[in-house]
Amino acid sequence: MSNMAVDIAGIRMKNPVMTASGTYGFGREYGEYFDLSLLGGIVVKGLTLKPREGNKPPRIAETPAGILNSVGLQNPGVEYFLENELPFLRKHDVAVIANIAGNTEEEYCAMTEKLGASVDGIELNISCPNVKEGGVAFGTRPESVYRITQRVKACCKVPLIVKLSPNVTDIREIALSAEEGGADALSLINTLLGMAIDIRTRRPILSNIVGGLSGPAVKPVAVRMVWQVAQAVKIPIIGMGGITTWEDAVEFILAGADAVSVGTANFGNPFAPVEIAGGLKAYLEANEIGAIGDIKGKVMI
Ligand SMILES: Cc1cc2nc3c(=O)[nH]c(=O)nc-3n(C[C@H](O)[C@H](O)[C@H](O)COP(=O)(O)O)c2cc1C
C-alpha cells in the first residue's frame, strides 16, 4: 500500500489533492456529488474583510483550452464565512484553507486575526489580477511580498501559504522574498493576465477588459514555474495551473510540488479531484513507489 499522506508545513492531509480557491466555492455544491472527506484539502473562495459583489458580467470567457475570468473576488466576507460556511466544511475530514485578499496590509492582518486558528491554514492571495486595488499589486515586487508576508505571519496562528502570481519577470525572486518574509509554504500559480475581443462588436468580451487565464492552456507555464521555485526555496510547494488528470498531477510533483490543487477542471468535471487522487494512488502502486513524497522533484534533468 503506497502512502498518499502529505504534511504541508504542519497541515496534514490524507492525500496531496486539494481544490483551488475560487473554483470550489465553500464546498457545498460539490458535496452533493461526493463525500468531501475524500479530498486532501479545500481552499475556499477568496475572502475579503467586507462582502464584495465582484465585477459586472460578463466575467467569464472561454478560450482554447482554458477560460478567462474576471470575477473580482465576489464573496460574502470573512465573518459570514466563519458563521455560515466553515461549520459545514468542519463536518468533513478534510483540511480547510482560507484564501484571503485585502486592499491594505491592515485588512490582511484584520482578516488573519478574525480567522485565528479556526482553519488549518491561511493562503495569502497577493496575486489576484481582477481587483483594482491591492491584489496583484502586493505580489509582483519582491519588497512588498516580503513586507506583507512578514506582517501577516506576525499575527497568523496557523501555517501561512503565500500564493504567487505568474505575472512577473522572475518567479524565483518573488518566491524567495515570501520565504524570507516567513511563509510556511507557497502555492502557485494564480491566473495569467489575458484579454479577449469580440470582433463583431469590437469590444472586449469581459466587462473588466482584462481577466485571468486558467485551465490546460497555462499548464506548461505553471510546471516551469513550480520547477524553478522548487530549485530556489526550501519550503513546501502546492502546484496548480491546468491540472485536469492524475498524469498532470504527477508532472507537477516531479517538477517539485508537495501537493497539487485542481481549479478550472472542477467546472467541467466535479469528480476531477477525486479521480486525480485515485489515479495518483494507482500510479504509485503500479510502479511500487512507497510514498507520494518519493517522486517529489524527481524530474531527471
Ligand atoms: C473563476 C475563478 C475564480 C478564482 N478565484 C480565485 C480567488 O478567489 N483567489 C485565488 O487565490 N485564486 C483564484 N483563482 C485562481 C485559481 O485558484 C488557480 O490559481 C488558477 O485558476 C490556476 O489553476 P487552474 O488552471 O487549475 O484553474 C480563480 C480561478 C478561477 C478560474
Image (tube, grey):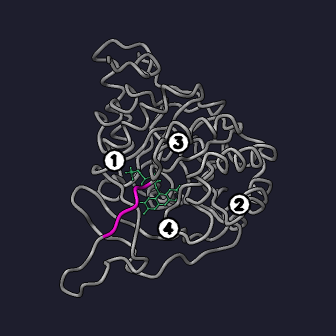
Q: Residues within 10 Å of mark 3 (few under 14, many from 20)?
A: many
Q: Could you tell which of marks 4 and 1 lies nearer the N-terminus?
A: 4
Q: Amino acid at mark 1?
A: Gly
Asked if residue 21 is among those painted magenta in the image, a careful observer would answer no
Foreground pick, 248 / 25: 248
Foreground pick, 57 / 76: 57
Front disc: 4 or 3 = 4
| Quadrant the C terminus occupies | top left
Marks 1/3: CA–CA distance: 14 Å
Q: Residue furthest bottom?
A: 201
Badges 2 and 4: C-beta atoms under 8 Å apart?
no
Q: Residues within 10 Å of mark 1 (few under 14, many from 20)?
A: many
Tag 4's secondary structure? loop
Q: Disc 1 beta carbon < 8 A from ligand 1?
A: yes
Marks 4/3: CA–CA distance: 18 Å
Q: Position of residue 223 (x, y in %)?
A: 36, 37
Q: Which contiguous range is marked in magenta?
A: 191-195
Marks 3/2: CA–CA distance: 23 Å
Q: Disc 3 beta carbon < 8 A from ligand 1?
A: yes
Taking the spot 45% from the left edge, 49% from the top edge, the residue there is: 166
The residue beneath circle 2 is: 82
Badges 1 and 3: C-beta atoms under 8 Å apart?
no
Q: Could you tell which of marks 3 and 2 lies nearer the N-terminus?
A: 2
Q: Residues within 10 Å of mark 2 (few under 14, many from 20)?
A: some
Name the disc covering residue 130, or none.
4
| Quadrant the N terminus occupies | top left
Tag 3's secondary structure? strand
The residue beneath circle 3 is: 187
Foreground pick, 78 / 128: 128
